[in-house]
Image (tube, grey):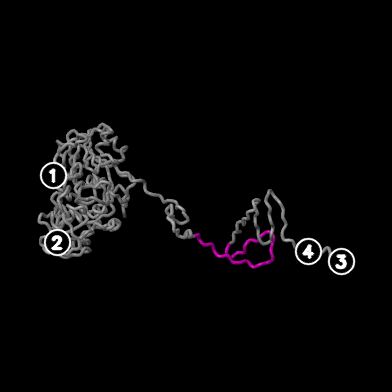
Amino acid sequence: MNNISLICFLISIVFFACSQKTVSQSHNGTTTTKNPYRKVIIRSSGTQTPPPATNKVPGKVATTPTTTPPTRQPVPQPAPQPTVPQPRPQQPVSTTTPTEPRNNSYNNHNPVPLPSKPALRMGPARLEQYLPILRYKRVGLVVNQTSTVGDAHLADVLLSQQINVQKVFAPEHGFRGKADAGEKVSNSRDIKTGLPIISLYGKNKKPTAEQLRGLEVVVFDIQDVGARFYTYISTMHYVMEACAENGISVVVLDRPNPNGHYVDGPILEPDYQSFVGMHRIPIVHGMTVGELANMINNEGWLKNGVRCHLSIIPCEGYDHTTFYDLPIKPSPNLPNSRSIHLYPSLCLFEGTVMSVGRGTDQQFQIIGNPQLRNMPFQFRPISKPGAKYPKHENKTCYGYDLSNMPISYLRQNRQLNLDWLLQMYQAYPDKANFFNKNNFFNKLAGNSRLQQQIKSGMTETQIRATWQADLDHFKQIRKQYLIYPDFE
C-alpha cells in the first residue's frame, strides 16, 4: 500500500505541474506569456499589441502555433476585399459660429495631385526666344491694345531692351483699340513713345514699300478670337505679303485662340473673298495666328504665291483644349468671354436687319429688332464709345437675351448655332428685307448658298450636311500646320 500511495502522490504532482497554463520568463526587458491558443507581446511599458496575423490562403489550412492546441476544424476565411476609403463620421452641428471653415474631405486627406499642364506662357512673354532675332535690327511692330507682356505694352518692353523699334502699324480699331468697327483710323504718333503710327485700315490695308522702307523685321502681336471674319488675320495676311515682296522678315508672337477648341462652318468660296474673309477656311478655323500664318505662307495664299521669311514664337503650356479668358478685350464690342464665344454665331446677324447689341453693354450677347414686338426681351441701342452710330439707334428692339448663357455650355457646345438665325428669319414679318442689300451677309458667310438655304426653309441639320465634306477636307489640311496638340 505504501508503494501504491507513493506512486499516486507522484502522479498527482506531475498532473498538477502540467495543468499550469503560463510560464513567464524575462528576456531583454520583454516578458513573453506563452499560451497554446494566442500570442500577445507585452511591451515593458505595459501596452499590449497583438502580433501580425498569420497569412492565410482561403481554402487551405491555417498555419498553427508552435504549441499545438486540441484538434479543431479550421474556420474558412473570406477572400480579402479591396479597401474602400470611408468618410469621417460627421460631427454634430455646433450651435455656435465655427472659428474655421469645416473640412468635408475624406479623412482630411489630400490626394496626390495628378500631373498638370505646364503654366501657360504666351509667345510675347518668351523674350529669350525672339530678342536675339531683333537685336541690332530695325524693327516695325503690328500691334494694338492687346499686345502686352505682363502689364507692359510690347513697344515699351522692346524699347526698354534697347531694341531699335522704328514704327508701329495699327489694325482696325487703332493702336489703342478704341475706334469703331469700320471707322477710318488716321496715321498719327504715339504720345508715350513718340513712335510714328501707320494705320492699316481703310484704303491702306496693306503696308506700302515706302512705309516698310528701312525695316529689317516686322513683329506681329495681336490677340485674335478665331473667327474668319475677325479682321486681324486679314491684316496679318497683308503684312506677310508686303514683307515677302520687300525682303523683310516676319516674326509672329503667338497667343491662345479662345475659340480654338472646335472647327465649324462653311468654307469661303473665292467669289466672296473680302477683308472679312480672305482664306479658304471655315468660319471657325480652330487655329492660332501662328498656325494660320504658317498655313497662309505654305499654301501659297499670298499674292503671286510669294513666301515670306517667317518665324513663329509659340506659346508654352497650351493646346487646343485650353480655355483662355482674355485679360484685355480684343475690340470695343467684344467685352467678355461670353461675347467672344457667341461672336462666331452672332456676327452673321451683322448682314441682316438685326442688332447684336452694339450701343449697349451687352454687345454680341443680345439679338433684336424694333419690329419683333412679341419677343420676350427688349433693349435700346444708343451712341457710345466704340459704337457711335449703332444699328437702330435710340429705338427699342425686341428679341433674345443670351447674356446669361453659361460659359461652360458655350465652350462644350463646339459648333456654330444657326438656330437663332433661323428663328429670327421666321419671326421677322418683312422677310424680303431681312438680309441687307449690300451683300454683306454673303461675305460673312463666304458664299451665297447659306442665305438661299435659310430662305428655302432648310433645317439646321440639313444646312450643316451641305458643308460637312468641305469641312472634313479642311481639317486634314489644318492638321499639317498645327503647332499644339489638337482637341480631337
Quadrant placement of the C terminus: bottom left
Q: Position of residue 166 (x, y in %)?
A: 20, 34
Q: Which residues are magenta?
A: 57-83
**Disc 4 vs disc 2: Cβ atoms closer than 8 Å?**
no
Element at badge 2? helix
**Mark 2 touching mark 3, by CB under 8 A?**
no
User: Which circle's residue, 4 or 2, is located before the other in the chain?
Assistant: 4
Where residue 143 appears, as percent x and y from the top left, is 22, 41
Residue matched to label 1: 184
Q: Of helix, strand and loop, which one carries label 4? A: helix
| Location of mark 3 (residue) | 5
Residue that numbered label 2 is attached to? 452
Contact, mark 1 vs mark 3 (Cβ under 8 Å): no
Q: Nearer the viewer, mark 2 or mark 3?
A: 3
Mark 1 nearby-residue class (10 Å; few <14, some 14–19, many ≥20):
some
Report the amino acid beneath label 2. Answer: Gln
- Where disc 3 sits, the SS reads helix
Nearest-to-viewer mark from 4 and 2: 4
Query: Viewed as shown, does residue 424 lie left or right of 16?
Result: left
Q: Residues within 10 Å of mark 2 (few under 14, many from 20)?
A: few
- Outermost residue toward the front in this view: 96
